[in-house]
Amino acid sequence: MSGKKTFVDSNVFLYLLESPSDKKEEATRVLQSRPCISPQVIFENVNVAIKKFGLSKEKALAHGEKLLSDCVLVLDTEHTVRKALELIGKDSLQVYDSRIVASALEADCEILHSEDLQHLRVFEGKLTVVNPFII
């Protein structure tokens, strides 16, 4: 599925904060492909880096800056918010998952890398969820 426009969920990039592992290597590979992300991905990563991983604010912010510089930032629009609300009702998604899916759809991505959503689930016939750690 390489060469397709991708969007990455927050959980994938959290592995960049761990000790060397297969998941960290795969997360690094995903990051090097210059995927799309939303501000939500950056803020969730910074928050978890501080609260769960115990990183200093400086290191957590540096991680956020790296994501910002190495990815394509997709900003929410009114359409994105309406799409997220629709997905909550129609597809029974959790609030923040619906926002990620809506952002990926808004960016015309074909692949959404995520561990939180069902692997190979397709949204609107054009966005496929791929868990990068099981393929």
Image: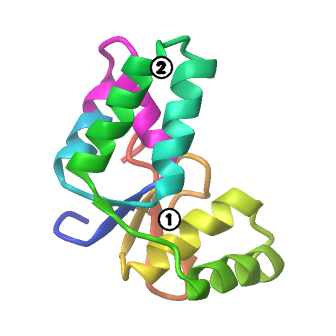
Image coords of residue 33 (percent x, y): 18, 53
Q: Is residue 18 magenta?
A: yes
* Residue at left offset 50%, top offset 65%: 120
In this view, 13 is above or below 50: below
Circle nearer the viewer, 2 or 1: 2
* Residue at left offset 36%, top offset 75%: 109
Residues 57 and 103: in front is 57
Please give the label number shown on residue 57: 2
What's the CA distance linking mark 2 and mark 1?
Answer: 35 Å
Image coords of residue 105 (percent x, y): 47, 80
Quadrant location of residue 91?
bottom right
Looking at the rendering, the stretch of residues picked out in magenta corresponds to 9-25
Q: Is residue 25 visible?
A: yes
Asked if the residue under mark 1 is in contact with the one under mark 2, i.e. CB atoms within 8 Å, the reply is: no
Label 1 crowding class (10 Å Cα cut-off): few <14, some 14-19, many 20+?
some
Dot placed on the residue nearer the N-terminal end, 2 or 1: 2
In this view, 82 is above or below 67: below
Q: Amino acid at mark 1?
A: Leu
Q: Is residue 23 visible?
A: no
On the image, numbered disc 1 is attached to which residue?
120
Q: Secondary structure at mark 1?
A: loop
